[in-house]
Amino acid sequence: MEKILIVGCKKTMDDLCIACSRCMVGFNRKVGEFSRYEGKDTELIGILNCGDCPGAGIVNRLVQIHLWNKPLDEKITKVHIANCLLDNCPHKEALIAKIKNKAGVEVIEGTHPFAPQSIFA
Ligand code: SF4
């Protein structure tokens, strides 16, 4: 069973990107970077924000969600970096490096495939 944690941008999540629903729909439909889970038992454990600029708290936040889920016997097996963070964050290189360095599980860059191709067309 894969247990997925999505990490995204605090300044975007549930604000510019309402309800983080594109990541959730992408996960439910197993499309975009979630297509790798097609036909596999997979659950979404959480959608975690980076902790705000410049993302200095990300490692502590990963520890927090791990401890938060431990009594529930839930263990994250994959981390996905959300598109909001990949597309917009000026600190993303350092942030993603910290996550990859400390997560201890595979870290996948990307989530849903629903970015609009154009605004007015
Ligand atoms: S550190 Fe990056 S991901 Fe986090 S709020 Fe700032 S811009 Fe968004």
Image: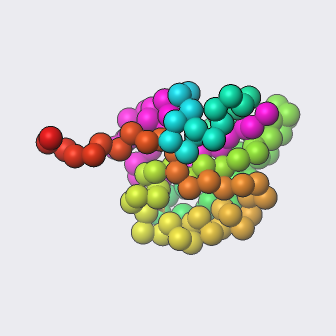
Q: What residue appears at the point 76 percent right and 45 percent down from the top-left corner?
A: 77
Between residue 22 and residue 48, name the one nearer to us. Answer: 22
Extreme-left residue of the structure: 120
Q: Which residues are magenta?
A: 1-26
What is the x, y in percent for residue 53?
A: 47, 63
| Quarter of the image where the C terminus is located | top left
What is the x, y in percent for residue 3?
A: 73, 38
Q: How is the image coloured?
A: rainbow
Q: Is residue 102 above or below residue 5?
A: below
Does the image show residue 48?
no
2 relative position to 112: left or right:
right
Q: Answer whether residue 35 is magenta in the image.
A: no
Extreme-bottom residue of the structure: 94
What is the x, y in percent for residue 18?
A: 38, 35
Rendering quarter of residue 39: top right
Between residue 96 and residue 121, name the one nearer to us. Answer: 121
What is the x, y in percent for residue 73?
A: 85, 34
Does the image show residue 106?
yes
Between residue 115 and residue 71, name the one nearer to us. Answer: 115
Q: Answer whether residue 20 is magenta in the image.
A: yes
Q: What residue appears at the point 64 percent right and 32 percent down from the top-left corner?
A: 38
Number of numbered discs overlaid on the protein picture: 0
| Quarter of the image where the N terminus is located | top right
120 relative position to 53: left or right:
left
Q: What residue appears at the point 70 percent right and 47 percent down from the top-left corner?
A: 78
